[in-house]
Image (cartoon, rainbow, N blue to C red):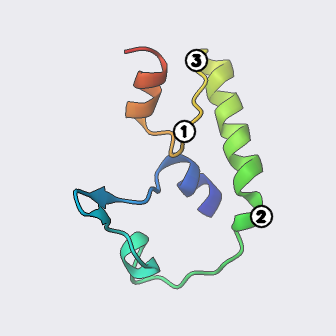
Amino acid sequence: MQSLSQTLEEAVTFDRDGVTSVDWDTYDRPRLWSLGVGEATQGPTAAAVANAVAVATGIRVRTLPMTPERLRVSAGG
């Protein structure tokens, strides 16, 4: 789940002054504890999702997270 979330949704946030997600509490789900077990699967999960998107749509997305906006940009529209 962590790898899918990082692939499809999670991102470091910024404003004009720099990074706004400066710690784990402001980065992701502040009321839930981090379990620290998903990191090893991040690369293969992102690659599998990217390949599935490419096969299904013909769009090759190379930037995470793979948001709908990024799919549109990668598709040229």
Precedes in sequence: disc 3 or disc 1: 3
Q: Is residue 1 visible?
A: no
Precedes in sequence: disc 1 or disc 2: 2
Q: Which residue does the numbered mark 1 point to in the structure image? A: 63
Which quarter of the picture shows residue 16? bottom left
Vertical placement of 49 versus 54: above or below?
below
Q: Which mark's residue is nearer the viewer, 3 or 1?
A: 1
Residue 45: x %, y % from top left: 71, 48
Residue 1: x %, y % from top left: 62, 61
Structural distance between the alpha carbons of marks 1 and 2: 19 Å
Vertical placement of 5 versus 30: above or below?
above
Q: Which mark is residue 40?
A: 2
Badges 1 and 2: C-beta atoms under 8 Å apart?
no
Structural distance between the alpha carbons of marks 2 and 3: 27 Å
Specify the amino acid type for callout 1.
Answer: Thr
Label 2 sits on a secondary structure element that is: helix
Question: Where does the C terminus fall, quadrant-wise?
Answer: top left
Specify the amino acid type for callout 2.
Answer: Ala
Quick one: label 1, few (<14), some, or many (20+) residues within 10 Å? few
Q: Nearer the viewer, residue 64 or 22?
A: 22
Describe residue 40's horizontal placement relative to residue 49 as left or right: right
Q: Which mark is residue 57?
A: 3
Which quarter of the picture shows residue 72? top left
